[in-house]
Image (tube, helix red, strand yellow):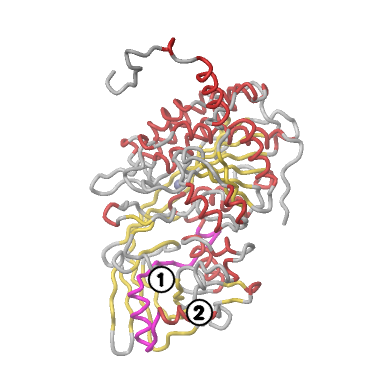
């Protein structure tokens, strides 16, 4: 009983005046718990499913997916396969229909994604070669490979500097307009001209999301350069000496994951990118010094004038030796379905997805449990599958439950699904993404983000909410009715403080990104980054299970409602 509050002995319940207590109870009921929505109001049609989503279950499922024994669910890994097998067994129990790869007469839950694991040997180096000198840099210390590097051997060639690697002719800005890129190694600065300065065209309400983020703009640039016949892309990374997680959080390099790099050959063919490397500012300055220029001053000039300044670095070459060891492997997406109740509309789909993978463990045994990222979203998808299975009525459209692989490696699983779909993508009426839905949010952070999304000042001022109630909803801007629908469902039946953040393109920070490019109205529910993300401290003890269950109930009601309406959401663009 230690620590439990008890009334002092000389006071008893009988002695407490009755009316103030009644008033207090009424006050608490009215003002304290916007979240305590009476489930009586939830329509009968969806109620059984709604009531089946319980916080205690969320925590229980998550305890398995985030267990040390699953070793951080790296892509590919035994731990991730075990997680997938576990979900498959639940789906079989709940009669969820498999919609992965075709297997003779049946289909499996798995959509197999062929992969090659890349190990870079000690011989991987980058040399700056002039007539009189060779300067050598080593992998991991001064550069790291990112994507598109799927061969062993040497890439060498002359170097061109191309500003920020941005081609935006519609904004009167093109870093590639005046340079010959064929067989060139292209050096660019990370970020955008003028950085976060609000007055640049790159931060205008209509265009800012195109240039936001770290890996996504680099990947888009690598795709463009593949079409233009360039040899490689070097992106100067100011934070090179820190480890930056795929979600953008800077982490102590010493505990960063030793998580491997992968590529998927079918994707490399369908969606080619040039070999791309992050390089340290030391490499950029060394290159510029050879042509009697200064890298940071050159970039500073672009920032000030907002004009491209691209040029060849004459009299030198770069030679990148890639000592690649490859292991052929595979991993899988998991895809299940509840069939819609309408004979026509069941051929349309609402997809609810979450990445099952995380970033593995270090060589010395630190496990990155990934409870919030993204055990929480994975549990969300499976609790919604269970709710849909238990609910006697089904929505008219079919509901697909997707557990993606390789999100942490660059949205590999969802990208693969959209390139090689197991159901017609044009029939996907909406996509709901759950990634990191179990932590408290800081109001300041949410307001800062709302500002970035160009929400009007008065709306930002009105954002309120406790850390345990705040939820970000990133929404594809061409489908604004999605925001209205979410707000309505939340106000009527959930009681979280949902902040709608609309943009197009959407931010490339999770698996909704490529769905929106397919013109699928998309929402990404996210409680936000936190200090434990991508560290060994993202464990089940640190989650808020009540909040997580509330987010899952909201996503369930949204999926049911989108699945049941006679008309699909429109895409206004
Ligand atoms: Zn994630």
The picture quadrant where one finds residue 133 is: bottom left
The picture quadrant where one finds residue 50 is: top right
Query: Which residue appears at 53% of the width and 33% of the height?
Result: 550
| Residue 340, percent from left and from top | 68, 31
To which residue does mark 2 refer?
A: 302
Mark nearest the camera among 1 and 2 is: 2
To which residue does mark 1 refer?
A: 236
Query: Which residue appears at 58% of the width and 70% of the height?
Result: 199
Query: Which residue appears at 52% of the width and 73% of the height?
Result: 193
Q: Which residues are magenta?
A: 268-295
| Vertical position of residue 93 compared to residue 451: above or below | above
Q: Are marks 1 and 2 in contact (CB under 8 Å)?
A: no
| Vertical position of residue 463 compared to residue 552: above or below | below
* Mark closer to the chain start, 1 or 2: 1
Q: CA distance from mark 1 to mark 2?
A: 15 Å
- Determine whether, in the image, residue 204 is placed left or right of residue 410: right
Q: Secondary structure at mark 1?
A: strand
Residue 273 drawn in magenta: yes
Front residue of this view, candidates 219 and 59? 59
Q: Quadrant of the N terminus?
A: top left
| Vertical position of residue 180 compared to residue 114: above or below | below
């Amino acid at each position: 009983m230690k620590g439990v509050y008890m009334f002092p002995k000389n006071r008893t319940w009988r002695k407490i005046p009755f009316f103030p207590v009644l008033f207090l109870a009424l006050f608490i009921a009215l003002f304290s718990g916007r979240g305590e929505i009476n489930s009586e109001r939830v329509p009968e049609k969806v109620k059984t499913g709604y009531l089946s989503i319980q916080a205690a279950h969320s925590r229980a499922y998550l305890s398995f997916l985030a267990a040390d024994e699953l070793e951080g669910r790296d892509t590919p890994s035994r731990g991730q396969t075990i997680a997938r097998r576990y979900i498959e067994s639940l789906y079989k129990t709940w009669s969820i229909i498999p919609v992965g790869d075709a297997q003779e007469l049946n289909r499996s839950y798995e959509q197999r994604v062929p992969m090659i694991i890349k190990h870079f040997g000690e011989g991987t180096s980058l040399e700056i070669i002039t007539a009189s000198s060779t300067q050598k840099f080593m992998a991991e210390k001064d550069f790291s490979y990112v994507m598109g590097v799927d061969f062993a051997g040497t890439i060498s060639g002359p170097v061109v500097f191309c500003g920020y690697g941005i081609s935006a002719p519609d904004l009167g800005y093109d870093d590639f307009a005046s340079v010959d890129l064929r067989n060139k190694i292209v050096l660019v600065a990370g970020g955008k001209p003028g950085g976060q300065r609000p007055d640049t065209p790159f931060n205008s309400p209509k265009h800012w999301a195109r240039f936001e983020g770290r890996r996504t703009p680099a990947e888009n640039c690598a795709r463009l350069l593949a079409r233009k016949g360039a040899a490689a892309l070097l992106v100067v990374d100011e934070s090179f000496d820190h480890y930056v997680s795929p979600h953008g959080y800077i982490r102590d390099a010493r505990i960063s994951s030793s998580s491997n790099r992968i590529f998927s050959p079918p994707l490399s063919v369908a969606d080619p990118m040039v070999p791309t490397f992050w390089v340290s500012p030391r490499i950029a300055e060394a290159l510029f010094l050879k042509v009697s220029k200064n890298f940071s001053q050159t970039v500073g000039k672009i920032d000030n004038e907002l004009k491209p300044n691209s040029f060849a670095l004459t009299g030198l070459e770069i030679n990148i030796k890639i000592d690649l060891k490859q292991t052929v492997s595979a991993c899988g997406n998991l895809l299940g379905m509840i069939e819609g109740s309408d004979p026509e509309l069941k051929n349309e789909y609402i997809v609810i997805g979450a990445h099952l993978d995380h970033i593995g463990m270090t060589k010395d045994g630190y496990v990155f449990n990934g409870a919030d990222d993204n055990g929480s979203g994975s549990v969300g998808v499976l609790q919604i599958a269970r709710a849909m299975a238990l609910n006697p009525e089904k929505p008219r459209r079919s509901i697909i439950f997707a557990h993606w692989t390789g999100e942490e490696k660059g949205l590999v699983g969802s990208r693969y699904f959209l390139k090689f779909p197991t159901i017609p993508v044009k029939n996907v009426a909406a996509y709901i993404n759950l990634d990191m839905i179990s932590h408290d949010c800081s109001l300041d952070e949410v307001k800062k983000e709302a500002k970035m999304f160009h929400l009007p000042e008065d709306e930002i001022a009105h954002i309120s909410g406790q850390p345990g109630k705040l939820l970000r909803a990133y929404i594809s801007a061409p489908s604004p009715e999605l925001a209205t629908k979410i707000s309505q469902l939340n106000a009527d039946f959930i009681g979280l403080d949902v902040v709608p953040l609309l943009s197009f393109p959407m931010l490339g920070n999770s698996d909704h990104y490529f769905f929106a490019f397919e013109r699928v109205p998309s929402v990404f529910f996210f409680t936000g980054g936190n200090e434990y993300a991508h560290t060994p401290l993202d464990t089940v003890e640190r989650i808020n299970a009540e909040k997580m269950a509330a987010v899952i109930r909201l996503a369930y009601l949204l999926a049911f409602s989108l699945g049941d309406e006679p008309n699909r959401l429109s895409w206004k663009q």
